[in-house]
Amino acid sequence: MNDDSRARILARIAAALGRDSSLAASTAAANYARIARDYRAANGKSGRFILDLFVRRLHEYDAACTHVASHADLPAAIASTLASRSMARLAFVSGIPADWLPQGWDFRAAESLSVHELDRVAGILTGCTVAIAETGSIVLQSDPRQGLRRHTLIPDIHLCVVLESQIVASVPQAFPHLVPDLPTTFISGPSATADIEMTRIRGVHGPRTLHVLLVAD
């Protein structure tokens, strides 16, 4: 909400209450400026603790995680993951580096696929913007390395490459990494709901499986 929108809303509230709208707006602005913004940016833990916490949270959310020793080992790790899940056809977003993709597999550019075609691929391969250890969350933004929202909503399996250097300790630490104008999604594990008879069902609002490829860099 921009300042003009806020001022119009406050003016309407003040008018409804029979008060001076300019006074109400200035008072609200002053109160807003006084809000403390010294959010906790770190928890004082070491990098190893943060990494282990992130992996533990992934497992708590029923997400799979494969540790990859280096960027050079990533194609072999992706190939092994595809083989273990019997995935013959995989979509990938255009910003994925070409040297991530192993040879001998049927890769389809996600941007060229319709919604119905996305539904027929086994899964999608993307990167991420940042990951959060405390919440076990992965943050996706609509850019070439992460694709559009539909690219990670429709396929049944989401393979997400996360670099160890992209993991931060807490939610406040994640925000400086985000581009404000881009659509942003926080995901914590595969899609799941227990709305119907308190029975947990996966894959209702998004991918049934989240598999993180955690790359040491």
Image (tube, rainbow, N blue to C red):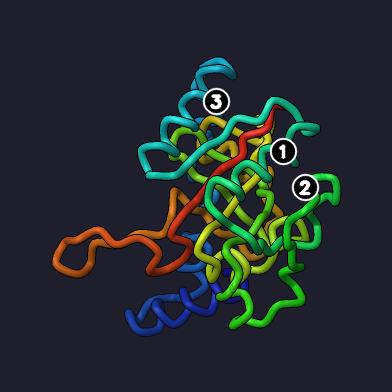
**Disc 2 crowd, CA 10 A, few/some/many (<14, 14-19, 20+):** some
Image coordinates of residue 115 in percent, x first then y, are 61, 81
> Is the Cβ of the residue at disc 1 closer than 8 Å to that at disc 3?
no
At label 1, which amino acid type do we have?
Ala
Compared across the picture, whether 15 is left or right of 29 comes to left
Residue at image position (54%, 25%) is 51
Residue at image position (73%, 56%) is 105
Residue at image position (56%, 42%) is 212
* Number of dots carrying numbers: 3
Whether residue 161 appears in this view of the structure is: yes
Per the image, the residue denoted by label 1 is 76
Question: Quick one: 91 or 79, which is closer to the camera?
Answer: 79
Q: Quadrant of the N terminus?
A: bottom right
Per the image, the residue denoted by label 3 is 51
Whole-number angstrom distance, CA of label 3 to CA of label 2: 26 Å
Q: Secondary structure at mark 2?
A: loop
Image coordinates of residue 200 in percent, x first then y, are 25, 58
Q: Quadrant of the C terminus?
A: top right
Image coordinates of residue 103 in percent, x first then y, are 80, 50
Q: Earlier in the sequence, mark 3 or mark 2?
A: 3
Q: Earlier in the sequence, mark 1 or mark 3?
A: 3
At label 2, which amino acid type do we have?
Pro
Residue at image position (46%, 74%) is 10
Of circles 3 and 2, the one toward us is 2
Q: Earlier in the sequence, mark 1 or mark 2?
A: 1
Q: Secondary structure at mark 3?
A: helix
Compared across the picture, whether 199 is left or right of 213 comes to left
Whole-number angstrom distance, CA of label 1 to CA of label 2: 7 Å
Per the image, the residue denoted by label 2 is 102
Q: Is residue 151 above or below residue 99?
A: below
